Structure formats: structure tokens, C-alpha cells
């Protein structure tokens, strides 16, 4: 299997994690960390569930992988994530020495790999990552689009119900 097909297979696993997040009402972002060709950690966003700003999928797979490997250095690993990492996650990726990051969709509002900044390829840091972007980008972007569309529709319906309830009270 060539690298592109391998990347697609692991990104599909990250998408499965993103779907788990969506079911929980979390922003559907999933990540897997691969070491020696095997997934050693999987996670999805849990920020709303935990009410903890640091429970992004990337941080959780890094934490789990460090425990499994027994080291904070995640050399010889590849991180697959459905959305371009934010500044917090990019920092954790650099600090944990992940050598390769593969992501699906760009994040034009918070992405710090290619969109807003290029933190993973900044030679001023003592570590740089190889980056591959756009793997299953359409699928990774669509799950986010669908999630936020449904969220807006729920908010709109709630507002409508509140207004209707107020009108009934007045009449």
C-alpha cells in the first residue's frame, strides 16, 4: 500500500472518532496517532462534555500515546487529525516531537499549520514536522459543515419556540 492510501486509511479512522464527537454534541474533530504502522491512540473532541478547554482530540491522543510509549517524545509517529490543528495543539505537537502530521480540512479561523500560521514548519523552533494536508478534506469538512448547520437550526428552532411561548403567555 502506498503512502497516500495508508494516509487515507488512517484518516478514515480519525473520521470515525469525529463522528463519535458529533453524536455527543461536540465539534466533530477526531485524531489518531500511529506508531510503527499501528494506531496507538484515538480520541475525539470532548471540550463541551468535560468543560475543559484542553480536551481537544490532538492533545488527548498525545497524552494517551505518551503513556503507552512511556515517553514524552513521540518520535517515529504520525498524527492524523480531521481538522488543521489550532495554536494550542500545534504547540503540543511540537513539544512532543511528533515528526509527521496529516490533516484533512483547513481551519481558516484557527489553523496554525497552514492557514493563519505555519507553526509546525517554523525553523525558529527546535523541532519541525513534515505536514500533509487535504487527505479526505471533503469528508472532513463536510462533517463539520453538517454539524454547524444542524446546530444553527436547533438554535433557530429554540428561539422560535421561545417567541411562540411568549406570545401564548401574552394572549
Image (cartoon, grey):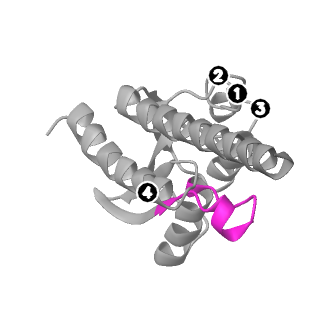
- Per the rendered image, the range of residues in magenta is 43-57
How crowded is the residue under tag 4: few (<14 C-alpha within 10 Å), some, or many (20+)? many
How crowded is the residue under tag 3: few (<14 C-alpha within 10 Å), some, or many (20+)? few
Residue occupied by mark 1: 109
Residue occupied by mark 4: 33
Which residue is pictured at 45% across the width and 27% down the height? 133
Q: Are marks 2 and 1 in contact (CB under 8 Å)?
A: yes
Q: Are marks 4 and 1 in contact (CB under 8 Å)?
A: no
Comparing marks 3 and 2, which lies closer to the viewer?
2
Among the two numbered marks 3 and 2 on one chain, the one whose residue lies closer to the N terminus: 2
Which residue is pictured at 27% across the width and 38% down the height? 8
- Name of the residue lying farthest toward the front: 171
Query: Quick check: 144 left or right of 46?
Result: left
Which residue is pictured at 70% across the width and 27% down the height? 109
Up the image or down, 132 lies above or below 89; here it is above
- Towards the viewer: 107 or 103: 107
Comparing marks 2 and 1, which lies closer to the viewer?
1
Disc 3 to disc 1, C-alpha distance:
23 Å
Tell me, yes or no, whether the highlighted magenta stretch contains residue 50. yes
Report helix, strand or loop for mark 3.
loop
Amino acid at each position: 500500500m502506498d503512502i497516500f492510501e495508508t494516509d487515507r486509511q488512517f484518516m478514515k479512522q480519525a473520521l470515525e472518532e469525529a463522528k463519535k464527537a458529533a453524536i455527543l454534541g461536540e465539534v466533530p474533530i477526531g485524531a489518531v496517532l500511529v506508531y510503527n504502522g499501528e494506531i496507538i491512540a484515538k480520541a475525539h473532541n470532548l471540550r463541551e462534555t468535560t468543560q475543559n478547554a484542553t480536551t481537544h482530540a490532538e492533545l488527548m491522543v498525545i497524552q494517551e500515546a505518551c503513556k503507552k510509549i512511556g515517553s514524552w517524545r513521540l518520535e517515529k509517529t504520525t498524527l492524523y487529525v480531521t481538522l488543521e490543528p489550532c495554536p494550542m495543539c500545534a504547540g503540543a505537537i511540537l513539544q512532543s516531537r511528533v515528526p509527521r502530521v496529516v490533516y484533512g480540512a483547513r481551519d481558516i479561523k484557527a489553523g496554525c499549520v497552514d492557514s493563519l500560521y505555519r507553526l509546525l514548519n517554523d525553523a525558529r523552533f527546535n523541532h519541525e514536522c513534515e505536514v500533509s494536508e487535504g487527505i479526505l478534506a471533503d469528508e472532513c469538512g463536510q462533517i463539520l459543515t453538517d454539524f454547524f448547520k444542524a446546530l444553527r437550526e436547533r438554535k433557530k428552532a429554540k428561539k422560535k419556540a421561545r417567541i411562540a411561548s411568549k406570545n401564548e403567555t401574552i394572549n
